[in-house]
């Protein structure tokens, strides 16, 4: 039986990735929801109306669940089982082919309560359960791989976007219930307030955070700053609680919006960094296993499987981001494959060297997963300077910063990307000084994560490296 675990190293997974006639590895999962035709019945083969085009046995979702519609016609083509296994297959493929999760990992799922992160949580959970089953089954054998652990984090932004406390408590209770109702292994659940980026003295820091966000006059800039703060919070929570990966529920639709937003904001240089499966520029690497899943499919799975979602406390998108969301929605109505077209087009951009799974942690485990790692992505460009990142949004910068601490506001200004300079930073010097005094320390200190990771790996494999006198040339 083929093992379904993305973390299984036994080799029984290999048959999932059968080689094509030309020897190249092929995607195991048929593309659905984008109008591609390789899931359609073969010529001469007739399929009765309302029967799944994949298994050719079960009734389609449209016939078995008439209340559920959408997802670019998938409801009319697939039965619930085939739809579900297609979607999970895309997730699992992204995880295994990019070495996203290794058995020793401690994975933090970023959870907003919406359908994308709900499905991410569900799939990570299912993968963990399968790994647990394998672990239990192979207990007696010599080499047993551990089962990765899972935690869930919700970022509480009520200091900046206040909601009635009743609504907030209800939402958090619902999220707690969702997490605790998942079968064991037990998952920790964290509610992380945005002000935690400063310190643990939340009362004073709430005021500082409000002032920081209020100091940004531009609507889009304000929203973007909140997004960067959200990631900083997740990073801090993950780091402080011993997590080694952050799983985001970012789906095709959200990436499509980001591509167009970045285009409008002039973030062309750094765009490629944001839209890959793996983003290891952070202290804790971030992975996007739902990159190939459009939101329509995720919504449909939530309805089909009654996966409970929580009414969002998030602010509606505004400014440039709001305009682009509605624009992409319109495009999608006109042609259901538009979102994946946008992502595939931007996917031609050359990724950065930090867009591959970082080589830290248990070196042997990593090498094992590296062997199974399939290279579908474009090769990262090692020549790009990656040591320099925007202090606010952490975008790679074209220029190199040669200072380590943004101590003066002039240093902070020169350590940010042009988009943050235009959209977030105040225009005049006196407001700039005030704004910089409100920034959390994590943003005014240049991160050197990539170098740290490489250094750590080097230390771990030091004994196996040839020294200059050992290499036979002297
Ligand atoms: Zn079927
Ligand atoms: Zn920036």
Image (cartoon, rainbow, N blue to C red):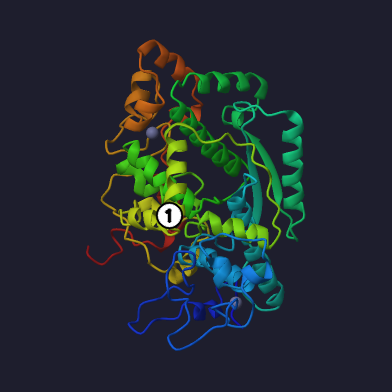
Mark 1 crowd level (few <14, some 14–19, many ≥20, 10 Å Cα): few
Q: Position of residue 1 (x, y in %)?
A: 61, 83
Quadrant location, ligand no. 1: bottom right
Q: Position of residue 7 (x, y in %)?
A: 57, 67
Q: Is residue 80 above or below residue 100?
A: below
Q: Quadrant of residue 153?
A: top right
Asked whether the viewer can see residue 217, the reply is yes
Q: Is residue 307 above or below residue 398?
A: below
Residue that label 1 marks: 334
Q: Quadrant of residue 234?
A: top right
Q: Nearer the viewer, residue 68 or 296?
A: 68
Q: Position of residue 274 (x, y in %)?
A: 41, 47
| Label 1 secondary element | helix
Q: Nearer the viewer, residue 98 or 61?
A: 61
Q: In the picture, which quadrant includes the C terminus?
A: bottom left
Residue at 61% across / 32% down in the picture? 157
Q: Nearer the viewer, residue 345 or 391?
A: 345
> Along the horizontal axis of the image, is 134 left or right of 447?
right
């Amino acid at each position: 039986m083929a093992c379904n675990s993305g973390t299984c190293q036994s080799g029984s997974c290999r048959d999932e990735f059968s080689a094509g006639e030309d020897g190249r590895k092929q995607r195991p999962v048929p593309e659905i929801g984008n109008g591609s035709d390789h899931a359609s019945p073969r010529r001469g083969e007739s399929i009765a109306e309302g029967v799944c085009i994949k298994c050719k046995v079960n009734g389609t979702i449209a016939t078995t669940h008439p209340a559920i519609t959408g997802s670019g016609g998938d409801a009319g083509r697939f039965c619930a089982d085939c739809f579900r296994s297609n979607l999970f297959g895309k997730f699992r493929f992204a995880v295994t082919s990019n070495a996203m999760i290794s058995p020793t990992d401690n994975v933090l799922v970023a959870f907003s309560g919406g359908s994308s992160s709900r499905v991410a949580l569900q799939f990570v959970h299912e993968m963990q359960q399968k790994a647990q089953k394998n672990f239990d089954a192979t207990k007696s054998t010599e080499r047993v791989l551990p089962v990765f652990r899972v935690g869930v984090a919700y970022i509480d932004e009520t200091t900046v976007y206040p909601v009635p406390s009743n609504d907030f408590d209800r939402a958090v209770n619902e999220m707690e219930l969702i997490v605790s109702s998942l079968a064991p292994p037990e998952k920790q659940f964290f509610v992380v307030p945005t002000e935690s980026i400063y310190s643990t003295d939340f009362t004073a820091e709430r005021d500082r955070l409000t002032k920081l966000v209020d100091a940004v006059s531009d609507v889009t800039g304000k929203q973007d700053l909140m997004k960067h703060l959200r990631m900083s919070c997740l990073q801090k929570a993950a780091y402080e609680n011993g997590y080694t990966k952050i799983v985001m529920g970012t789906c095709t639709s959200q990436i499509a919006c980001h591509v167009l937003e970045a285009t409008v904001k002039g973030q062309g240089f750094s765009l490629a960094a944001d839209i890959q499966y793996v983003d290891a520029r952070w202290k804790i690497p971030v992975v996007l296993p739902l990159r190939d899943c459009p939101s329509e499919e995720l919504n449909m799975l939530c309805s089909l499987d009654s996966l409970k979602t929580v009414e969002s406390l998030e602010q509606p998108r505004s400014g440039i981001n709001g305009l682009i969301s509605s624009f992409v929605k319109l495009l999608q109505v006109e042609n259901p494959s538009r979102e994946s077209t946008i992502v595939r087009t931007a996917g031609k951009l050359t990724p950065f060297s930090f867009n591959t799974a970082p080589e830290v942690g248990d070196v042997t485990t990593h090498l094992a997963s590296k062997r199974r790692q399939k290279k579908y992505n474009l090769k990262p460009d090692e020549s790009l300077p990656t040591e320099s990142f925007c202090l606010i949004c952490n975008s790679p910068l074209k220029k190199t910063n040669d200072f380590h601490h943004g101590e003066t506001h002039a240093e902070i200004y020169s350590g940010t990307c042009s988009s943050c300079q235009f959209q977030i930073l105040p225009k005049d010097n006196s407001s700039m000084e005030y704004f910089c005094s409100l920034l959390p320390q994590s943003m005014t200190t240049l991160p050197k994560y990539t170098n740290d990771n490489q250094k750590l790996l080097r230390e771990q494999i030091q004994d196996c490296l040839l020294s200059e006198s050992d290499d036979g040339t002297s």
